[in-house]
Amino acid sequence: MKRTEPAVPVAAPAAAEAAAEQAQEDQPDEELADCVLCGEPTEYPASTRGATLCPVCAWQEAQRTACSG
């Protein structure tokens, strides 16, 4: 059976948390981006490029793409 790679790479939750902490330390007064899946605020500043996910959606996306059987 052929393995397929996810269309959008998703960082590991620990890596995502570290990146979010670093981003907040850099610009603590900036507005936060909304999650593109559920609309909840993320840990990333609004100026972050790409699809930003909240911690819950990032974890769910990682679970969906981790193993398909």
Image (spheres, rainbow, N blue to C red):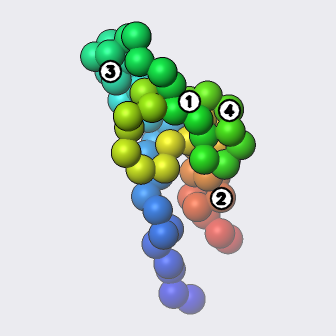
Q: Nearer the viewer, residue 33 or 65?
A: 33
Q: Earlier in the sequence, mark 2 or mark 4?
A: 4
Which residue in the structure is indicated by mark 3? Answer: 22
Per the model, the C-alpha gap separating discs 1 and 3 is: 14 Å
Displayed quadrant of residue 16: top left
Q: Which mark is residue 40?
A: 4
- The amino acid type of the residue labelled 3 equals Gln
Per the model, the C-alpha gap separating discs 3 and 2 is: 26 Å
Question: From the image, which quarter does the C terminus lie in?
Answer: bottom right
Which residue in the structure is indicated by mark 1? Answer: 42
Per the model, the C-alpha gap separating discs 1 and 2 is: 20 Å
Dot 3, how many residues are within 10 Å of its Cα: few (below 14), some (14-19), or many (20+)? few
What kind of element bears circle 2? helix
Q: For marks 3 and 2, give the one nearer the viewer.
A: 3
* Contact? badges 2 and 4 (CB < 8 Å): no
Question: From the image, which quarter does the N terminus lie in?
Answer: bottom right
Q: For marks 2 and 4, give the one nearer the viewer.
A: 4
* Contact? badges 3 and 4 (CB < 8 Å): no
* Residue beneath the point at 60% across and 40% down: 35
What kind of element bears circle 1? strand
What kind of element bears circle 4? loop
What kind of element bears circle 3? helix
- The amino acid type of the residue labelled 2 equals Arg
Per the model, the C-alpha gap separating discs 2 and 4 is: 20 Å
Q: Which mark is residue 9?
A: none
* Residue beneath the point at 43% across and 58% down: 9
Which residue in the structure is indicated by mark 2? Answer: 64
Q: Earlier in the sequence, mark 1 or mark 3?
A: 3
Displayed quadrant of residue 17: top left
Number of numbered discs visible in the structure rendering: 4
